[in-house]
Image: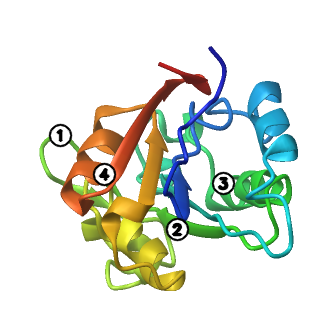
Amino acid sequence: MKFNPKLDGIKLLICDIDNTLADRDSDTLYPHVAEWFRRHPDINRTTASLKFALVTNQGGPACHDAGWSISDQFPSLKQVQDRLAKIVEQLPPWTTLHVCLAYVSKGGTVYIPKNHKPTDLVADPRRRKPSPIMIHEAMEHFNISNPQKVLYVGDRPEDKEAARRAGVRFHQVKDGVSL
């Protein structure tokens, strides 16, 4: 089965990016995901009744700037920004993007990219999934108050937990393929 979330009664589709719409290190949608967006009538018109948002944890820049011996293995903030911009270009023009750049270690240490503070919206570690904050931001942006009208698509336990905490429906995928 390919990417095929059930959209009955859904007004807002929210997706994770990495390993949901595109490979973690790619700036191109999976071909079957791109095809789904091209052929889906409710999301591909200017007057679309289905709204679309992305929510994503992107802790790489914080790790890149952490000064660890392996920091150069993580993407810089500019690399992440460029990649996300290319992904968004492949999606409907009204797509909203909600990003958390903070990284929180298993021990609870918070890392923030250079030139950001934890009080900066994109670097606020409280927004990091499994927190439902970014899902709530997307709902507020599109003025959708009923969580049952929202479907979140993701691949990781953090995605499923964020959807549960937000009270929205969840659709599991792996490498853009519905499970």
Q: How far apart are marks 3 and 2 (CA)?
A: 13 Å
For marks 4 and 2 on the same chain, the one whose residue lies earlier in the sequence: 2
For label 2, the residue is 98
**Looking at the picture, how far across and down is residue 151, in whole percent?**
45, 52
Q: In which quarter of the image is residue 102?
A: bottom left
Q: Nearer the viewer, mark 3 or mark 2?
A: 2
State the residue in front, 121 or 69: 121
For label 3, the residue is 80
Q: Is residue 87 above or below residue 117?
A: above
**Can residue 34 be seen?**
yes
- Relative horizontal placement of residue 95, taking residue 16 as reference (left or right): right
- Relative horizontal placement of residue 152, taking residue 106 as reference (left or right): right
Tell me the residue at 50%/27% (across/down): 173
Tell me the residue at 66%/29% (across/down): 23
Q: In which quarter of the image is residue 157?
A: top left
Q: Distance between the residues labelled 2 and 1?
A: 23 Å
The reply to whether dot 4 and dot 2 touch (C-beta < 8 Å) is no
Three-letter residue code for mark 3 = Val
Three-letter residue code for mark 2 = His
